[in-house]
Image (cartoon, rainbow, N blue to C red):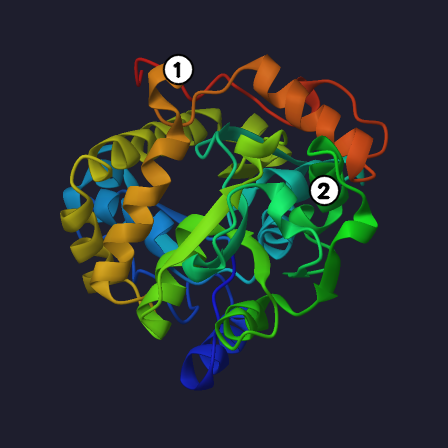
Amino acid sequence: MKRLLTGIAAAALLIAGCAPSGQGSGGSGGNTNAPADATEVTFTLNWVPYGEHAPFYYGIQKGYYADEGIDLKIEPGSGSGNTIKAVAQGQTMFGWADTPPLLNAISSGMPVKSVGVFLQKGPSSVEFLSDKGFKSIKDLKGKRVGGTPGDAMYATFPALLAANGMKESDVTVVNMDAANKIAQLAEGQVDAIMGFFHDQGPTIEARTGKQVDHLLFADSGLNLLGTGIVVSEETLSSQKDLVGKFVRATQKSWAEAVKNPEDAAKAMAELAENEPPEEVLVKQLQLAEPLLQLDTAGAPGVNSDDQWADTIGIMADNAGLKDAGEPSQYWDGAHAKADGS
């Protein structure tokens, strides 16, 4: 989820949001290991760099993208919705975005698709300082929970309450900007916030010195697919081989990075800009690893029709997804293979 930005970092993000592809603040600066005839590929993240993104920088450093003939340039993002729009408009070739806003974008007519969700157990959660002692969603009764109108967690929070035998009136939802949630939680203005635990938790702990716990939506009756690779319909049809190469390099980057989180974090610290401290990057990546569900997926980014159907159903029933349709409307599973081929 989105990190708190202040001062120079916030200004850099604003500049990045206006810069042409390949020139954003926070970009990787390209793949120095790529051969001279490599294809330059831009890849826009869902937000400014945090630990979940370390595998991409590791893949550049280790030459996994270069091995596929790709000169990869990584750009920071300003939310999954904006990244998806940039892909649809041809401003970037690939994007890294959350699945719920992707479903909404496609249902509204944007010509994009997923070619593989990597975080298959959704990172959506309710986060809180450990001294609150919450053990289940029911413990939120009578509490103040911060959320950002318009994001998938906010839209599905009433369904999370219902799944746990609660009414919307049992909890006071405090509307707040995504960039302010961490500060407001740390200052005690709310009892908990909705967010991505693997990003925000380590960030809050590093800034406050206080331990953070969370309750996952996925463990409380509401699992939504998380972040993955987004590409335009035009690129899928006209550059099928390149899409396959990018997905294959990304699968290898993730598979190796989660085995070597310290090395992946070090690569990110060397190549990215405005990233969290290295020790925070390591923890964020380690927390992301179980979300890959490698025991069932076989390899990073390999999805099933059932997973997509479940997420589509939850969004249709609880988050206003119109004309939901079948998984094939949103996802092309031809590129992310369990054997990495």
Observer-nearest of 175 and 246: 175
Taking the spot 76% from the left edge, 43% from the top edge, the residue there is: 158
Would residue 243 be found to the left or right of residue 86 on screen?
A: left
Q: Work out whether residue 41 or residue 60 is closer to the camera in this orientation and state it.
A: 60
Give how far across and how far down residue 255 sits, in percent.
26, 30
Q: Is residue 127 left or right of residue 198?
A: right
Image spot of residue 239 (x, y percent): 49, 30
203 left or right, relative to 80: left
Residue at image point 67% right, 44% down: 101
Position of residue 75 relative to residue 43, above or below, is below
Q: Earlier in the sequence, mark 1 or mark 2?
A: 2
Disc 1 and disc 2 in contact, CB within 8 angstroms: no
> Which image quadrant for residue 256?
top left
Kind of residue sitting beneath label 1: Thr
- Looking at the image, the residue that sits furthest to the bottom is 7
Q: CA distance from mark 1 to mark 2?
A: 26 Å
Number of residues whose C-alpha sits closer than 10 Å to that of mark 2, classed few (under 14), some (14–19) or many (20 or more): many
Q: Is residue 47 above or below residue 262?
A: below
Q: Which mark is residue 279?
A: none
Q: Quadrant of residue 225?
A: top right
Q: Nearer the viewer, mark 1 or mark 2?
A: 2
Q: Which SS class for mark 1?
A: helix
Task: Confirm whether residue 330 shows in the render.
Answer: yes
Q: Amino acid at mark 2?
A: Thr
Q: Quadrant of the C terminus?
A: top left
Residue drawn at 64 percent across, 51 percent down? 140
Residue 31 vs 305, above or below: the answer is below
The residue beneath circle 2 is: 156
Question: Residue 46, image x and y in percent?
Answer: 51, 53
78 displayed left or right of 161: left
Residue tagged by mark 1?
296
